[in-house]
Amino acid sequence: MKTAKTVDELRNEIKVFGENKTIGFAPTMGYLHEGHLSLIKRAKTENDIVVVSIFVNPTQFGPGEDFESYPRDFEKDAGLAEAAGADILFLPDAKEIYPVGSATIVEVEGPITKKLCGSSRPTHFKGVTTVVNILLNIVSPDKAYFGQKDAQQVAVIKKMIRGLHMQVAIVTCPIIREADGLALSSRNVGLKTEEREQAPVLSRALNIAKDLWISGENDVATLKTVIANEINTMPLADIDYVDILDYETLAGIEKIDAPALAAVAVRFGNTRLIDNIILE
Amino acid sequence: MKTAKTVDELRNEIKVFGENKTIGFAPTMGYLHEGHLSLIKRAKTENDIVVVSIFVNPTQFGPGEDFESYPRDFEKDAGLAEAAGADILFLPDAKEIYPVGSATIVEVEGPITKKLCGSSRPTHFKGVTTVVNILLNIVSPDKAYFGQKDAQQVAVIKKMIRGLHMQVAIVTCPIIREADGLALSSRNVGLKTEEREQAPVLSRALNIAKDLWISGENDVATLKTVIANEINTMPLADIDYVDILDYETLAGIEKIDAPALAAVAVRFGNTRLIDNIILE
């Protein structure tokens, strides 16, 4: 595996592989876990070259959020990425990504970025779409791989790709979970013992709602109450949001008639966890 | 010359030329004049394939501006573009460019889009950067050609290209002028006889300032007054702005120590004209 710290180094490393090779790209913020590795492994099976980026993007963190404390372990990440099949690891610093400051922004407007995480993190998706746009321009991949855990992020990025006519296919990979159901996240490392014990309530609550929906309940308000009640059985859980939306547009719905996304965000102490399940 | 109305048609026409051909691209709003044709001719000398787009972009016009009345003559344009060397003419409609509405925007923030035309047209450059980003993604040119007449537009687009790490070279072509100095513009057709007679005052005023600067005057306030006074000798001229700024950043300056841009916008009746000169 090669490592590149600058855009020029990265493009040179890609050139070494020769012309007309397909490129698969997994953009990450590092502190890699099995979720990230599943993206890299999938990319490896579908492309000639696999590029993995690790960049903890400052512009997608709001004031008071966990940019400084976001976990980092670039050395361990390099070993994991290589073992999963990465050919090139791109490790830029902020000056490399934002050479003229963050003066040019890419923003998906409308409810899709205002709901769910967009409500409690109002500038988050502007930072995400801008950095993903930049990384896609730098790497020029044929396919880019994202995890379903960040379902809203995937929906927003797909809308950006379509809205700006970017020539890349977005591949969404399933959520990877611990044995007790907790969705893997780099932020899980911040959970204290008791918080970690209670955190599986997110997936448990979502699955209860899914079972109820399968058995015939399609009223969104009822299903949201069921989810919230289940989460609230855990004393350390502090709900940020519980919502069920149209899966494609993230528009609000009252009944589930088309594929829907049930999504939750819950704080445990200083750690904010998200999870989701598709009702389809 | 081939004509394409959709993105798919355009990409297919480009493919017909074979692999690894260089593409030169001149994006226009049509009603082509010698200024546009100079871009196409220059592109022809530097690339294997020349793509010209004609798209009167609604999102760069503000409320009450001249979107509806902007001059259009697609048939004549096709003949002119072909004669100048265009290989493919791209004539999309708004639904083709904005399939999901104008929900994703690209914006260069800061003074560069707030000064000059950005002051009287506050949403203009957001529309320009968004549509240029989209067109560049659709065409994937090696080089894109713009006219120096829209000097601020060129500065903003260059900043977007650099900020988003887009892989395209921007080529700026000189202003083409009538014999009496009036910069060519599709909007000149809207000038009434008397307005047309007075319109060369823009270039005359800019040249007077340049001569004064060459002879040693480098105080910006003095030079701006000279330009404004000259323009105001024409009774039908209504100044929108007269400014002299750092050429690269468009930051305000008091003395000219580095290349500077002297730029003016003047209304004659319903027609708003712009012109500029570089002091370097």
Image (cartoon, coloured by chain):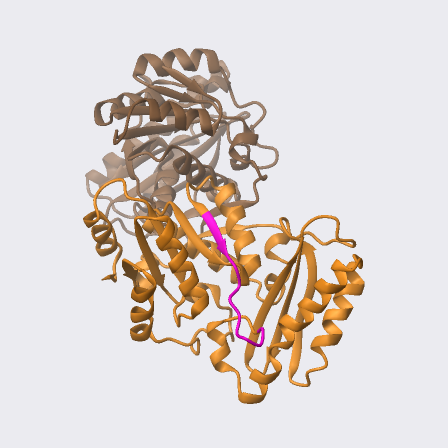
Chain colours: A brown, B orange
Q: Between residues B182 and A54, which one lies in front from this camera angle?
A: B182
Quadrant occupied by the N terminus of chain B:
bottom left
Q: Between residues B74 and B216, which one lies in front from this camera angle?
A: B216
Coordinates of residue A140 in the picture (x, y in percent) = 35, 35
Magenta residues? B170-181
- Which secondary structure dominates the residues rendered in magenta? loop
Coordinates of residue B263 in the picture (x, y in percent) = 64, 63
Picture layout, residue A122 above or below residue B278: above
Q: Is residue A168 left or right of residue B110?
A: left
- The tally of labels here is 0
Picture layout, residue B88 above or below residue A177: below
Coordinates of residue A273 in the picture (x, y in percent) = 44, 29
Which residue of the protein is positioned furthest toward the bottom in this rendering? B193
Whether residue B114 appears in magenta in the rendering, the answer is no
Query: Residue visible at 59% across and 81% down?
Result: B268
Query: Residue visible at 26% across and 30% down?
Result: A22
Q: Between residues B108 and A120, which one lies in front from this camera angle?
A: B108
Q: Between residues A69 and B55, which one lies in front from this camera angle?
A: B55
Query: Residue visible at 55% across and 32% down?
Result: A58
Whether residue B171 appears in magenta in the rendering, the answer is yes
Q: Is residue B153 left or right of residue A150?
A: right
Q: Is residue B2 left or right of residue A62?
A: left
Picture layout, residue A34 above or below residue B53: above
- Dividing the picture into quadrants, the one containing residue A136 is top left
Residue A193 visible in the picture: yes
Residue B123 visible in the picture: no
Coordinates of residue B109 in the picture (x, y in percent) = 58, 50
Q: Is residue A239 left or right of residue B210?
A: left
- Dividing the picture into quadrants, the one containing residue B224 is bottom right
